[in-house]
Amino acid sequence: MRTIPLGKTGLAVPAVALGCMRLTALDERGAQTYVRTALEYGANFFDHADIYGGGTCEELFGKAIAGIPREELIIQSKCGIVPGKRYDFSREHILRSVDESLKRLKVEYLDVLLLHRPDALMEPEEVAEAFCELKASGKVRHFGVSNQNPMQMQLLQKYMPMPIAANQIQLSLACCTPISAGIHVNTGEEAAVDRDGSVLDYCRLNDITIQPWSPFQYGFFGGVFLGSEKYPELNAAIDKLAEKYGVSNTTIALAWLLRHPARLQPIVGTMNLDRLRDCLRAPDIVLTRQEWYDLYLAAGNTLP
């Protein structure tokens, strides 16, 4: 598996990360097979959140990795969402969430902790204090955010002594406004509307790794574009390239993201082993510039 640097952490991580939100679709044996299959391909970066399955995804993962040396795994989790009630970046909530995640995962530390969705009541000094405590105690090694814009990150970074390592944002062929807004800059077109503060460029300028979530979805959890009747032109273009490269449509859709020079690290959440293997082949496919733009246009995006 090709690796990329994770921000300024010094960590070399797989170009594709594995999201564990749906892990409880498997039983314990299935989860073990999933983890070991991923490791065979060099995919050792696993993304969690304290709210996935109400904590049961982390619990199952903790059982699935029993017997695997901790240093062979890169484990990332997220905190900050109290489902249906609030977002909470308070020091107490962050520290408690990490302790509970570590207990469920049956590990002594997280490689990476991300803040999950922006908290309107965030006090950056308090977040930085929690991060410093976690780092000093050895419970978390690196820190990042999820779904934040540049100013939110800049405000937080003002108080953090360590760099923000990653930012998870929604990004796919059929949901790529961070890319299309840059293409349409200085035009009066709808696609030129900057909805995220040029987050893609900001992260590149500051060596923050972007981790696209839902890399096969359109809209905000609107559905998967692969095989969808809503995207006939896109699927035809993907299938043509899949035949050319001798891979699946899943591989091509993910290769489109990986072709971007920002060195994105997509989070894939499939629990199907065949589709998992298709995802993990994507770093081996390097689309040409023309092929990349052909897919971009086939998805319904435009050029000025």
Image (spheres, grey):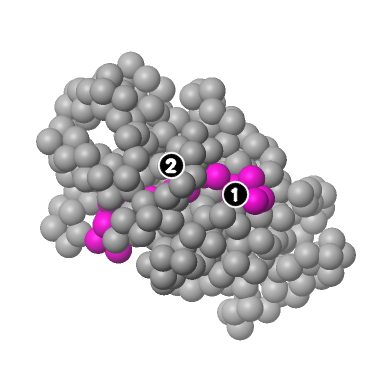
Who's the residue at 46% across and 55% down the image?
19
Residue 82 screen position, x and y as percent: 18, 54
The quarter of the displayed image where residue 250 is located: bottom right
Would residue 8 appear left or right of 115 to someone viewing this image? right
Closest to the observer, 259 or 151:
259
- Magenta stretch? 39-55
Which element is circle 2 on?
strand
Mark toward the viewer: 1 or 2: 1
Residue 16 screen position, x and y as percent: 59, 48
The quarter of the displayed image where residue 134 is located: top left
Residue 234 vs 8, above or below: the answer is below
Residue highlighted by disc 2: 75
Residue highlighted by disc 1: 39
The local crowd at label 2, few if under 14, some if 14 to 19, many if 20 or more residues have their Cα within 10 Å, is many
Would residue 273 appear left or right of 77 to someone viewing this image? right
Farthest bottom residue in view = 229
Visible residue check, residue 88 = yes
Residue 276 vs 223, above or below: the answer is above
Closest to the observer, 155 or 99:
99
